Image: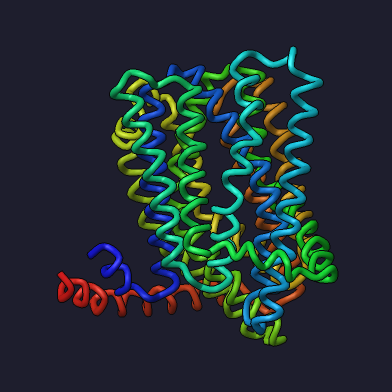
Amino acid sequence: MGFRLLSVFRNNHIQSLLGNVISAFFNVLSFAILVRILPESAFGEWVMFIATYNVLDQIRTALLQSGLIKFYAGTDEATARSVCGAAWYVALALTIIFLLLNAGVLAIGWHYFNATWQFFLLHLGLLLVLSLPFNFASWLLQARHQFDKIVHIRLLQNSSFLLLLVILHYTGNARITLILYAYAFALGIASLYCMLQRWTSIHSLWFRKKEQVKALFVYGRLIVGSMVTSGFIPYSDNFFIRTMINPAAVAIYSIPQKFMEVIEIILRSFVATAQPTLSAAVNRNDWREVSKAFCRYTGAVTFLILPFIIGLIIFVQPLIIILAKKNYLGATPIVLIFLFSAILYPIDRFIGVTLDMINKPQLNFYKNLLKVSINVVGDLVFIWLFMDLRAVAAVSFLNLLAGVAFGYYFLKKQLQLSVKDILKEGWASCSLLLEKLPAKLQLVKKIN
């Protein structure tokens, strides 16, 4: 019945949104359990480790995801197979490089790490290997617009980790070592499922062509700078907080970051459908459609997130207690700063996506480099002056504002658009979505 119900929602936006909702729902539950079963210092260390893993995973994603979508979507079968094979070749090569670097860091710096980080780094390579088929299948399914299958993958991976956490908690074995093994097992299960379903197309590796490998790498290396600098912003926050304050403060600061998952659900869903749409318009040299698509996505998501932001602001303290515990209520002002900043998230994200898709990834890189530079300098100065997490959150707002101003200025030089167009196209898209919703709900009732 569950998958039959999913078939009702054939709209790509709905399916992409559903996948992100499922992922975020299980992530929030997992987060809530981890907050309760780990001491603040241990939880702060776990947050830092996962952030470290995510940085490496983002490098791999940046190098391949956008390029795979750009060169794969809308092509003939032979070209698509060659592109897929080239992407697998680059993915495997990069993963091997990560493993060698990890081994080098362990060999050189073993005595500088505490026991927890020695354990973490010993298993970092395992996570990178186990997550590769899972991630690659997600990118490929996105390029094919098969968002319903991405829902299946995310449901399996996230629910597996949550189930294992519950088992560890109720058996009294909630140690950080076993939590890492549970995370690795969930990634492995999802990757195995993707391979059994043949969603990874790993056989295409034999059909790779040298020119496709080169094209993917040349295009992807420009995206890497943008995504890594963007991902380094929250990582630098956590790093400076841990170093200049303490690991427990990292745990406090992770609360507002988790609140942003609600906004990220909507953003990631629309970004996933925007990338192939923008890429197809660029490949047709339809610049009017590129501009219209940017305005439509940016405006629609801005309007869609407003009710969520308002709701989160109103119920911020009860939600913190539900998500974590009462002793995390100190995060309230930080959460509020993040929520007020979130209104700029859609325009910032879609400026970056659009610059990448119109073959101007260097401009997106400069935008994110500006943001991370402001963030690093601001964190160092503000923490040194105030030793207050609110100051760190304020710096995050400043770098976001600077990034939007920079990106909008340069995107406007490439496309004909205005703030008025963004609001107009966005409102029209939201109205159309709301008009279709009653019909969808009626169909759901009939199925039930």
Q: Report if residue 405 is visible in the image.
A: yes
Closest to the observer, 228 or 99? 99
Between 375 and 59, the one lying in front of the other is 59
Q: Position of 412 compared to 50: left or right?
A: right
The C terminus, quarter of image = bottom left
Residue at screen point 53% across, 24% down:
44
**Residue 415 on image: x %, y %:** 71, 77
416 in relation to 171, above or below: below
Asked if 135 appears above or below 160 in the picture, the reply is: below
At 55% from the left and 27% from the top, the residue drawn is: 389
Quarter assignment of residue 99:
top right
Is residue 267 visible to us here? no
Colour convention: rainbow
- In the rendered image, residue 102, in percent from the top left (x then y), is placed at 74, 32
Residue found at x 70% / y 82%: 283
State left or right for residue 153 relative to residue 362: left
Picture layout, residue 291 above or below residue 142: below
Lateral position of residue 194 relative to residue 382, left or right: left
Q: Position of residue 428 (x, y in %)?
A: 43, 79
Q: Position of residue 276 (x, y in %)?
A: 60, 73
Q: Quadrant of the N terminus?
A: bottom left
- Residue shown at 52% from the left, 70% from the top: 273
Q: Quadrant of residue 233?
A: top right
In the picture, measured across the screen, residue 441 lies left or right of residue 432, that is left
